[in-house]
Image (spheres, grey):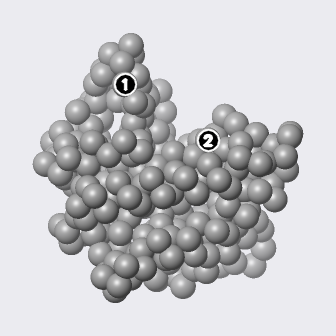
């Protein structure tokens, strides 16, 4: 059985106080979901909770001794300096995050992130031993005019280039690429399995083509794929049939513990 990753992206849906309250109320639920959900013989799944940045530290402390992992929702493309309001990948590591979401369409839009900035974040996270979860996806217009693959190519190329120029890629870190059609996020609209199958196969092929000739000494990164965009308990049953999917990035549905539990189970 495949090892799956379930990422709860709490976005900015809860304030600091609400986040602590929610996590405290469901502490035992989350812990038992992460530890006992599937017998180890069938493969171990991972749950990553991503609270907004101010709640990161107390949530990390709360789940410290458990199997629950904590991820950040952002990091800076810069390493150090006069960048008011930003936090570097080094801090994401030092605070105790195992994962970090980057390139989310909401962040790309709000902060006008360039593809190169997303790639810089990716590299810095690898440098500081944090697993990057890079989001890519096309707009509705691009989907309707069959430009999905060119949109994804534009977003993936700088990431692949960044990996290729890195001398060391830690083979103990598995970066994730989350395909999230922008028009699916928070809308309840999900593309059919035929489209998703085609896209996931295309991404997987891109990865193997890009790294098959990687020079000796640089470990070929083992990249895994997630799906995100209006995932619910109901549609996750159909979505998980897509062979290349190794987990889900769940937004709205992760705010309801019972719903999230059903997705994981
Ligand atoms: P959604 O969000 O599940 O609410 O569509 C997914 C995401 O943006 O990560």
User: Would residue 61 be found to the left or right of residue 181 on screen?
Assistant: right
Name above or below for residue 228 compared with residue 217: below
In the rendered image, residue 158, in percent from the top left (x then y), is placed at 67, 69
Horizontally, residue 125 falls left or right of residue 196, namely right
- Name the foreground residue: 22 vs 89: 89
**How far apart in space, not on screen, are marks 1 and 2 (Cα)?**
18 Å
Under tag 2, what secondary structure? loop
Q: Which residue is mark 1?
A: 1
Secondary structure beneath disc 1?
loop
Residue at (73%, 64%) from the top-left corner? 161
Q: Relative to 59, is 263 on the left or the right?
A: left
Question: Relative to 264, does residue 10 appear above or below in the rendering?
Answer: below
Q: Which residue is mark 2?
A: 222
> Foreground: 90 or 58?
90
Q: Residues within 10 Å of mark 2 (few under 14, many from 20)?
A: some
User: Tag 2 or tag 1, which sits nearer the N-term?
Assistant: 1
Residue located at (46% from left, 82% from top): 109
Indicate whether 227 appears above or below 47.
below
In this rendering, does residue 49 appear at all?
A: no
- Per the rendering, the mark at residue 217 is none
Residue reaching furthest top?
A: 41
Q: Residues within 10 Å of mark 1 (few under 14, many from 20)?
A: few
Task: Identify whether 241 is placed above or below 18.
Answer: above
Whether tag 1 and tag 2 are in contact, CB under 8 A, the answer is no
Query: Which residue is drawn at the image coordinates 27% and 42% (left, top)?
Result: 241
Q: Quadrant of residue 115?
A: bottom right
x and y percent of residue 239 in the render? 26, 49
Residue 81 position, x and y percent, is 78, 73
Which quarter of the figure is the N terminus placed in?
top left
Residue 105, horizontal then vertical, whole percent: 43, 73
């Amino acid at each position: 059985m495949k090892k799956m990753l379930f990422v709860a992206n709490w976005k900015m849906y809860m304030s600091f106080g609400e986040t602590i309250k929610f996590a405290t109320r469901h502490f035992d639920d989350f812990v038992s979901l992460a530890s006992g959900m599937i017998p180890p013989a069938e493969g171990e799944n991972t749950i990553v909770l991503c609270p907004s940045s101010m709640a990161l530290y107390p949530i990390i402390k709360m789940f410290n001794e458990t199997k629950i992992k904590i991820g950040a929702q952002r990091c800076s493309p810069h390493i150090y300096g006069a960048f008011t309001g930003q936090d570097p990948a080094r801090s994401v590591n030092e605070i105790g995050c195992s994962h970090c979401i980057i390139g989310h369409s909401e962040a790309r839009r709000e902060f006008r992130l360039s593809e190169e900035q997303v790639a810089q974040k990716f590299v810095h996270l690898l440098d500081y031993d944090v697993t990057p979860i890079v989001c890519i996806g096309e707009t509705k217009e691009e989907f309707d005019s069959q430009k999905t693959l060119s949109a994804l190519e534009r977003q993936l190329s700088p990431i692949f280039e960044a990996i290729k120029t890195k001398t060391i890629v830690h083979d103990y870190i598995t970066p994730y690429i989350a395909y999230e059609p922008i028009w699916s996020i928070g809308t309840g609209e999900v593309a059919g399995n035929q489209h998703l199958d085609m896209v996931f196969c295309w991404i997987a092929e891109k990865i193997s083509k890009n790294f098959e000739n990687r020079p000796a000494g640089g470990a070929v990164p083992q990249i895994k794929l997630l799906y995100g965009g209006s995932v619910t308990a109901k549609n996750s049953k159909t979505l998980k049939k897509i062979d290349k999917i190794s987990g889900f990035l769940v937004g709205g549905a992760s705010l309801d513990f019972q719903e999230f539990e059903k997705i994981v189970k």
